[in-house]
Amino acid sequence: MAPRAPGMVTARQVADSLGVAVSTVGRALADDPRISPETKALVQRAAARLGYVANTPARMMRGGSSRLIGLMLPDIRNSFYATIAEAMSACCDGAGYQLVFSIAGDPDVEERHARELASARVAGIVIVPTPDPRPQTREILRHFPHVQLLRRVAGLSPAWFGIDDEECLRLGTAHLIAAGHRRIGYIGGALHYSTGAARLAGFRRAFTEAGLDPAGAIEALGPPADAGFGSRAAQALLQAAPPITAIITGAVQVTGAVLEALQRSGRSAPRDIAVVGFGDEPSFSWWGPGLTTLAMPIDELAQSCGNWLIDRLRSGAAIEEHASMAATRLVLRGSAGADRL
């Protein structure tokens, strides 16, 4: 057993200060359901007053788990994922857990980070998975309560929280079609992303529902977090012949690349081309005439996901099949222009 650091407060000292058994202190701090809420609160206040720090490794050796929840994201270069991290952190803090954050944008890094989270005996994991996680990653996650967020991959947790990706792009594309646009360019995620496939389906469905041939549309698909892809795709669309009259995007990073490409080309929206973006970055409201965009309740989605997982961790319930899908709203500003009919 490792020696106790000089001056470190022990569970026995906390117990003696309250006149209760050491086992009561341990169970109260571990949120054991056998201990009443009143006793738990009493022990927690005493522990905080005395400066007691729980011996997490020892508790885990006795069969307990940590108070850590892992969050695995592919990217944090836009406010979309940053909002998720902030909301999830607040959710965990409020429930007595601590968030451990991981950026795992490719399958190899994802496997390594999943292994590290497992070695830390996290209580649960929220993951935005890569399109095709390694078999080792799937096996690791099989042994931990986990929830999929935004993307959905077969073979991982049956619980998923996301947005209605197909309806999202259908809504934005239908708006452009209603304004008279037929030659529309779409830049979005590749089909091996569950979100990419659904958003492309929504883009195409808007044409079908309007009784239009989608042959006049141009589709550019690739890695959505790659700014280089977004920039190249935007440049190609702006040079298309015959020219397109509108662009809609299916990723936040791609939206930024399109706006930069427009600025470099000297074109403006909606005078030269109409634009509907994806996500609602703070800068989008004051870009040019204001960006018409597809906004999602990401903060609420992340909190719902975190609360759902924590409820199951507290109750010991299994992670059963569950799907929660948030609606998107079209934020109308100036970039999509007026009716062309």
Image (tube, rainbow, N blue to C red):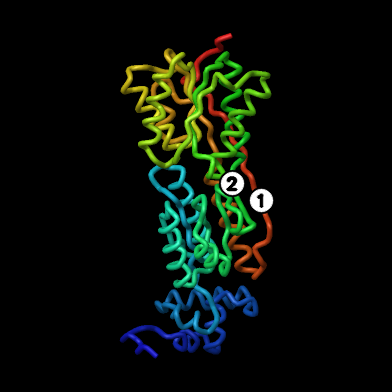
Q: Which mark is residue 323?
A: 1
Residue 6 on image: x %, y % = 31, 86
Check the image and name the residue furthest to the top: 341
Q: Is any atom of residue 279 visible in this view?
A: no
> Based on the displayed image, in which of its 4 quarters is residue 330 positioned?
top right
Residue 22 on image: x %, y % = 52, 88
Q: Amino acid at mark 2?
A: Gly
Viewport quadrant of the N terminus: bottom left
| Residue marked by disc 2 | 162
Residue 190 on image: x %, y % = 50, 39
Residue 266 on image: x %, y % = 32, 17
Does residue 92 sit above or below 338 in this rendering? Answer: below
Q: Amino acid at mark 1?
A: Ala
Neighbourhood count class around disc 1 (C-alpha, 10 Å): few under 14, some 14–19, many 20 upward: few
Q: Secondary structure at mark 1?
A: strand
Does residue 151 sit above or below 181 in this rendering? Answer: below
Side of 31 where 2 appears, left or right = left
Q: Earlier in the sequence, mark 1 or mark 2?
A: 2
Q: What is the CA distance from the residue labelled 1 to the residue labelled 2?
A: 8 Å
Q: Secondary structure at mark 2?
A: strand
Does residue 105 sit above or below 246 in this rendering? Answer: below
